[in-house]
Image (tube, grey):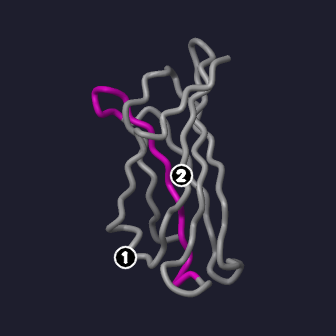
Amino acid sequence: MANIDITSRIERLEVFEERLGVTLQSLSAFVQDGGADSILEVCGELQPLNGTELQGDVELVVAAYDSSGRIIGTSSCSYFADEFFGLETFDLTVLLPMNQVTKVRVYPKKG
């Protein structure tokens, strides 16, 4: 299986980050090509913009798009304000029906 670096295809929605008082840092994206099915792995850090606490619960979403702009896979994870400790790393995996990812969106939303 080949590991293909597609970090340059990541799009952040910084307006959403600002709205929730967080920032996403150290992002990377790799596709493990397995023929008919592939696996997208997106890693990074979630940090508050100010201080060490989240303003509220946050759900982090990863969406993979093909060349037609269709979503071909998604994954998400939740962070709870009362359990958050200043910085969290994440490693989200998305099963893809093909290795044709042209864009990867990573964004937070209210949890």
Depth check: give the residue in front, 79 or 22. Answer: 22
Q: Which mark is residue 27?
A: 2
**Residue at the outermost top position:** 35
Give the alpha-carbon distance from disc 1 to disc 2, as whole Å: 19 Å
Task: Say which residue appears at 68% left-offset and 77% top-offset.
Answer: 84
Label 2 crowd (10 A; few <14 / some 14-19 / many >=20): some
Residue 66 inside the magenta-drawn segment: yes
Question: What are the residue bounds of the magenta stretch?
Answer: 54-70
Q: Secondary structure at mark 1?
A: helix
Neighbour class for label 1 at 10 Å: few (<14), some, many (≥20)? Answer: few
**Image coordinates for residue 99, horizontal then vertical, percent:** 49, 21
* 96 horizontally vs 8: left or right: right
Q: Position of residue 9 (x, y in %)?
A: 40, 39
Q: Which residue is mark 1?
A: 19
Determine the residue located farthest toward the left in the rendered image: 68
Residue 99 part of the magenta-drawn span: no
Identify the residue at image location x=44%, y=32%. 72
Total numbered circles: 2
Q: Secondary structure at mark 2?
A: strand
State whether residue 12 is above or below residue 69.
below
Q: Residue at x 37, y 29 (%)?
A: 66
Q: Position of residue 51 (x, y in %)?
A: 57, 87
Residue most extreme to the bottom:
51
Dividing the image into 4 quarters, which one contains the N terminus? top right
Q: Quadrant of residue 71 in the image?
A: top left
Left or right, residue 104 beside residue 67: right
